[in-house]
């Protein structure tokens, strides 16, 4: 299925002016899912990558969104071969990270946790450490270019189908004082349960280090149960299939109660969910039900290029579907900062000095 055939996923939202101005925080955004299409084309030429589906940046943007709109997470993930192919040198990683910070800041994002899998950027001869340093340098440059309007931290992702997660967890700990805020597990969920990576999570716990896990996207409540109760995750990437454990009348099962009552944040990414088949359309997306039931909800992009979205567009889709006003987005933004892997005083400063005044001024 392509977006053009699917009225549930309009190509782009027309964003209200106040939404662009509203301060935003994003906890779930993949570096390799958010490149500028023109940058991909330029970098592909420079590094001799000839497999791009088109060299026209506008067409390339449409191609990603359409190709990812298959109803399957596996197919969605196949598109990342084209972005990772051009992310194999220090120069490319610095540029992509700096542009990511600029693009987010231009969209009103004041705090971002950007994730990527270092193991996917070694083909040009970089070491894992060099990859992390390059991305961090790029983000520091991007923050400078925006005049400090945005704070960016990274999450290092271990891929669930490979066996390097412990190494990536150790890398996370090694770079924790240098812009790396935590760890994540991503990739195809079916057949790759999070407990395969228990050694990584145990290492992070012993080191008092933060992590989140993609769960409840392509697999249901059992995946969320394992992520929360076996792996001890602090947040859940997506998590929308927690609805498996909620009855039609809104009665919560034991797992759903545990997640809600412990304020475990859900990193909800509506447009991505529509593309991978985790939700049917915006109007029936569980985000609103979960919010009304008291879950700690954060709103996110997942992959700005691959899902053809921005934080402002995600906000706008929620306005259109549920009639949300600024007070709901203020709630989501404060929730994101409460769940952020940033020291408490820095989170409080962002809430008190940036987010609250920003919403008051809308
Ligand atoms: O939504 C997702 N679910 C699972 N894996 C994902 C998702 N979005 C991106 N990824 C994968 C593809 C990327 O190459 C990898 C690291 O960012 O994470
Ligand atoms: Zn994701």
Image (cartoon, rainbow, N blue to C red):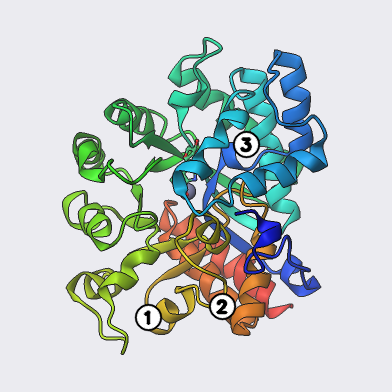
Look at mark 1 in the image and give the residue it sits on: 294
Query: How far apart in space, not on screen, are marks 1 and 3 (Cα)?
Result: 34 Å
Look at mark 2 in the image and give the residue it sits on: 283
Residue 222 position in % (x across, y down): 22, 58
Above or below: residue 171 compared with residue 1: above
Residue sitting at x 35%, y 29%: 168
Number of numbered tags placed on the structure image: 3
Whether residue 234 sits left or right of residue 96 in the image: it is left
Q: Quadrant of the N terminus?
A: bottom right
Residue 145 position in % (x across, y down): 76, 40
Q: Is mark 3 within 8 Å of ligand 1?
A: no
Query: How far apart in space, not on screen, are marks 2 and 1 (Cα)?
Result: 19 Å
> Of helix, strand and loop, which one carries label 3?
helix
Q: Which dot, 2 or 3, sits closer to the camera? A: 2
Above or below: residue 230 compared with residue 185: below
Look at mark 3 in the image and give the residue it sits on: 139
Q: Which dot, 1 or 3, sits closer to the camera? A: 1
Residue sitting at x 31%, y 26%: 164
The reply to whether residue 231 is visible in this rendering is yes
> Of helix, strand and loop, which one carries label 1?
loop
The reply to whether residue 305 is visible in this rendering is no
Mark sitting earlier along the chain (1/3): 3
Residue sitting at x 33%, y 37%: 160
């Amino acid at each position: 299925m392509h977006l053009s055939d699917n009225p549930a996923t309009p190509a782009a939202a027309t964003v209200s002016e106040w939404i662009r101005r509203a301060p935003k925080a994003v906890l779930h955004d993949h570096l390799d899912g958010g490149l500028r299409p023109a940058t991909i084309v330029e970098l592909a030429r420079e590094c001799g990558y000839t497999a791009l589906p088109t060299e026209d940046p506008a067409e390339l943007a449409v191609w990603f969104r359409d190709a990812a709109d298959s109803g399957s997470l596996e197919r969605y993930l196949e598109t990342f071969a084209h972005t990772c192919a051009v992310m194999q040198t220090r120069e490319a990683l610095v540029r992509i990270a700096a542009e990511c910070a600029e693009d987010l800041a231009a969209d009103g994002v004041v705090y971002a946790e950007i994730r990527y899998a270092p193991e996917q950027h070694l083909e040009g001869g970089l070491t894992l450490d060099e990859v992390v340093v390059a991305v961090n340098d790029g983000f520091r440059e991007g923050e400078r270019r925006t005049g400090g309007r945005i704070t960016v931290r990274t999450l290092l992702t271990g891929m669930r189908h490979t066996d390097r997660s412990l190494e990536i967890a150790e890398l996370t700990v090694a770079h924790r004082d240098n812009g790396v805020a935590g760890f994540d597990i991503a990739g195809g969920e079916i057949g790759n349960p999070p407990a395969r990576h228990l050694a990584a999570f145990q290492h992070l716990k012993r080191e008092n280090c933060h992590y989140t896990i993609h769960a409840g996207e392509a697999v249901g409540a059992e995946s969320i149960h394992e992520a929360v109760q076996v792996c001890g995750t602090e947040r859940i990437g997506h998590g929308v299939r927690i609805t498996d454990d909620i009855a039609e009348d809104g009665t919560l099962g034991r797992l759903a109660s545990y997640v809600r009552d412990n304020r475990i944040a859900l990193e909800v990414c509506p447009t991505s969910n529509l593309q991978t088949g985790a939700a049917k359309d915006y109007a029936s997306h569980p985000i609103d039900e979960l919010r009304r039931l008291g879950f700690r909800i954060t709103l996110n992009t997942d992959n700005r290029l691959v899902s053809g979205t921005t934080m402002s567009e995600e906000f706008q889709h929620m306005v259109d579907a549920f009639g949300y006003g600024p007070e709901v987005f203020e709630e989501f933004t404060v929730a994101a900062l409460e769940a952020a892997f940033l020291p408490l005083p820095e989170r409080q400063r962002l809430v008190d000095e940036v987010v609250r005044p920003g919403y008051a001024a809308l």
